[in-house]
Image (tube, helix red, strand yellow):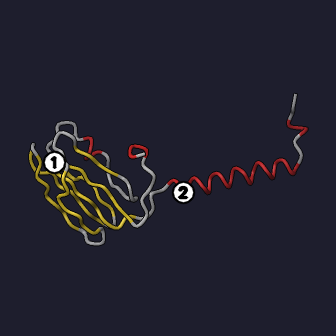
Amino acid sequence: MLSIAHIKPGDWLTLLLGALLTAFLGVTLWQGGAADKAIIRSGGKIFSVVPLSRNQLISVPGPLGISQIAIHNLQARIASDPSPRQYCVRQGWLKQAGEVAVCLPNQVSVELSGKQKNYDSLNY
């Protein structure tokens, strides 16, 4: 049986370096990168592609009514939607490339896109 007394200083250093490397790789490679535009869809078709550099409020028509997409400080969110449960509104601000908010009953979505596409297991 191995006890803590048998672990040498070099072993602790190896464990520490391994943990730091794992944390560093997780932070740098897991993120989708910086987003520079928002792709807004309505009814499965692209409604608009807008830059995140300009603050604006965009009205997007859907089967249930109008959804409001807010662009502010290089972020995007669905500010209001006529859907009953408001899941897409509660999702909040999208900041990284690859993040998506979808209002299913109203068939409206917003996806952030950047220079680097992140890994998406749904498209694998």
Disc 2 secondary structure class: helix
Within 10 Å of the Cα at label 2, are there few (<14), some (14-19), or many (20+) other Cα atoms? few
Q: Amino acid at mark 1?
A: Gly
Alpha carbons under labels 2 and 1: distance apart: 32 Å
| Image location (x, y in percent) of residue 68 | 17, 55
In the displayed structure, 23 sits above or below 113; it is above
> Is 85 displayed left or right of 98 in the figure?
left
Residue that appears at 18% across and 50% down: 80
Vertical side of 93 occupied by 73: above or below:
below
| Nearer the observer, 14 or 114 | 114
Q: Amino acid at mark 2?
A: Leu
Q: Which mark is residue 20?
A: none
Res. 32 image quadrant? bottom left
Q: Position of residue 117 (x, y in %)?
A: 42, 59
Q: Which residue is tagged 2? A: 29
Q: Quadrant of the N terminus?
A: top right
Residue 44 location in percent, x, y?
Answer: 19, 49
Residue 51 spot, x, y in % from top left: 28, 69
Query: Which residue is disc 1 drawn over?
Result: 43
Q: Is residue 104 rendered to the left or right of residue 63? A: right
Considering only order in the chain, which callout, 1 or 2, is on the residue closer to the N terminus? 2
Label 1 crowd (10 A; few <14 / some 14-19 / many >=20): some
Q: Quadrant of the C terminus?
A: top left
